[in-house]
Structure formats: C-alpha cells, structure tokens
Image (spheres, grey):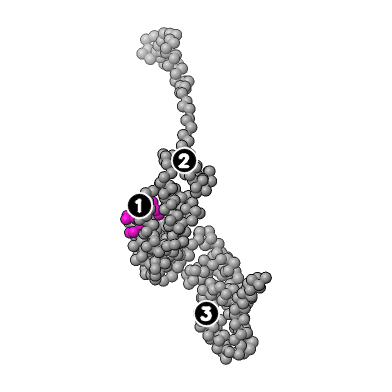
Amino acid sequence: MQALKSLFSPSSPFRLHKFPTKKPTKSFLSLFSNLSSPTKTKTKTKTKPKTPFSNSTIINYLTNTLKFSKTQALSISTRFYYVKSTEKPQSVVLFLQNLGFSETQIRSAVRVSPHILFSDIDKTLKPKIEFFQQLGFVGSDLGKFISKNSTLLSVSLERRLIPCVEILKKILCNNENNQCLLRVLRRCNGVVKGDPESRLLGNIAYLKRCGIVGSQLSMLLTRQPWLFVIQENKLRGLVSRVLDMGFVVNSRMLVYAVYTVSCMSHETFMRKLDFIQSSGFSSDECMEMFRKAPGLLRASEEKLKLGIEFFMNTIKLERSVLIRLPSCLMFSMEERVIPRYRVLQIMKSKRLLKKEPSFLHMLNLTEEVFLTKFIAKFSDHTEELLVAYKGHLLDSSSEDETLICV
C-alpha cells in the first residue's frame, strides 16, 4: 500500500500529469466529421443506348420486292443504314434470278446472309457460284444449296473453299461425280468455311492416329462431317469416352462406336442402355452387345423393344444368342424379320425342307439370295411363299390402285 502511494507522490517519476483542458476548435472537429459522414458523390445518369438507324430505302425494297416482313426488313436495314441506293441489291437479285433461283430461294439466301445483297457480283459472287457449279450443284440443286448456305458466298475462295474441298476429295472414297462431296457440303458447310490448318487437318490427323483411315474415315466424313471441324479437345473427349467402353485404337469397330456416340446425347445413350438392361440383360452384357454391334443403340427404343420381344418370346431365342449376335436386332422388323419368319413357318408346315435352316442365317442372306433359295426354288408354292413374304407390299399397292380408281 505504501508503495502504491509513493507512485502518486509529487517526487515520483511515475506521477500522473494533468494536461490542460482546451476546448477543441471548429476546424479540429471538422476533421472527425469528415471521417464519420460519407462523402456525397454525384450519381451519373445512365444514358440510353442509341437506337441503330433504320434505312427506309432498304426496308421498302426488302418488303416490296423480296416480300420480307417489316420486322425482318427492319433488322436487316439497321446493319446497312449507310446504303443510299438499291442499285446493288437489285443487280444481285437479278443475277440470282438469271441463275434460276426462285423468289423463295432468294429470300432465304438473303435472310441467311444479308451481306450478299451488297456484294460485288463479278469479284465476289460469280466466281464462287461458278465454283459450286463445277462441283456439281447445277440447275435446281444450286438454288436449294445456296438458299441454305449463302454464308459460303462470303468465304474466301482461294484461302478457304478451294483448299478445304481438295482435302475432302482426298478422303472420300467412291466419290463418283462428287456425289459424296456434295452430300458432305449439304450436311455441314462448316467443313469448308474455316482455315484448313486450324481444325480440319488437325482432326483428320488425330483420327488417323486412332486407326480410322481409308473407307472408315470416308464413311465418318460422309455421315458426321461436323466431327472434322469441332475443337480437337472435344473430338479427343468423344473418342476417349468410346475407349472407356472397351473399344481399342486400330480396331475396325472403333469408327462405328464413335459414329453412334456422336449421334446422340450422353443422356439418350444411357437411357437406351438402361432400356436393354431392363429387358433382362446385365450391365456388362449390354456393353458387350454394344461393342459387337455399335449401331444397335442408333435404333429407336420402340424398335429395340419390338425386336427383343419377338426374338425372346416368339422365336424363343436364348438370351445368350442375342448377346453373341446383337446385330439381328438391327434388321427391319416389318420388311425383313417378320416376313422371313412367315416364309419359314409355311415351309415347315408343308415340310418343304429336308433340314430346317437357322433363322438367324436366313436373316443375314441378301434379298436376291433369299428369294432364290427359299421362294423361287419351290415352284409349286412360289405364289403362296411370295404372298407371305411380300403380302404387306401387295396390300398397300392394291389400296393405292383403289384410291386411284375412286
């Protein structure tokens, strides 16, 4: 206690000092007031975006001459507000009319790519039209193609169209009169739009490294041309999915699996597998069937259901046989499976066969061979067998004749 008192004694070096009290000045208080109250900033008023100028000259031309709706014409005119005359659009339309394009085809071409109305005919349009004509788009086919793919008229002929087409020609097999090439261009014009060095050549090289070459590469290009111009990492991801299902690089089935998986979403693919599994097959058995017949999952669920029920319930085929030969589920039930089964039943009932053939063997025969071996060979019963085989076609043709007579 005595030590504590000594702290407050006048002689203690630790004594408390009294500071003189002074009323704070106004300027001193203002410093704190500035800290405590937020500063008021001027709020900027948002300016409305400028409405693009519409061009009444172009609007009138599009609505009156090409029969566009006012909404469509307005949308196009805002992109070409600087155009003062319809002289160039008129000459472009006349050029297309002279090529045999219908009014509908011209309107469709302009809707897809309005820029063509303002393109130079001799420098831009004519050389590309002639290029497509040389490929085989002639007559009405030219109008149909350009009406849906008019964006190609704005693509460089020397840097894009010609190099890409030459690359595609080297891949396609049995490309008589460029028919396969024309089919590719109709399905996906993107294969000739881009720089061939960017995606086309890279994807071709990758697919070849996977063992997809020759006729297989040609088939894939003809059926799924867009695969050749997607980003390479997406293509790699697609192939990786297929490899994870048990396919291997350089196998002949790989390309068919890639084709099937690329035809549908992952959800659709899994739903079809689940459907087959619900019919009494295990998950591993379903994957084994897919690996043996990748095209199986391109069939509709209705077709799969009808096929599985017919083979397992009507023919009493063992499940193991379907697992071993799943391709039989891919045949047309109406045109092939059921008609040939009817023929076999008649032949059995009339004892026309010394040895009953395998029904699965009968399904795999070509039309010509089947008619020769199982119908024409039995001359006394040919008519009955033919009616059993083609009766559904005869009925439909007789109905057509009745309608014509009426």
Residue 378 part of the magenta segment: no
The answer to which quarter of the image holds residue 239 is bottom left
For residue 367, the mark is 3
Q: Which residues are magenta?
A: 152-164
Residue type highlighted by circle 1: Asp
Which of marks 2 and 1 precedes in the sequence? 2
Q: How many marks?
A: 3
Determine the residue positioned at 43% across, 70% down. Answer: 253
Residue underneath mark 1: 122
| Outermost residue toward the right in this view | 406
Q: What amino acid is found at the position of numbered circle 3 in the picture? A: Glu
Name the image quarter holding the N terminus.
top left
Q: CB atoms at circles 2 and 3 under 8 Å apart?
A: no
- In magenta segment, residue 153: yes
322 up-or-down from 42: above or below: below
Tell which of 381 and 102 is nearer to you: 102
Where disc 2 sits, the SS reads helix
Residue pointed to by mark 2: 57
Find residue 378 and report its image quarter: bottom right
Quadrant into which the C terminus falls: bottom right
Give the CA separation, mark 3 to mark 1.
Answer: 53 Å
| Of the pair 287 and 112, the residue shown nearer to us | 112
Rounded to the nearest angstrom, the CA distance separating label 2 from label 3 is: 63 Å
Q: Position of residue 351 (x, y in %)?
A: 62, 90
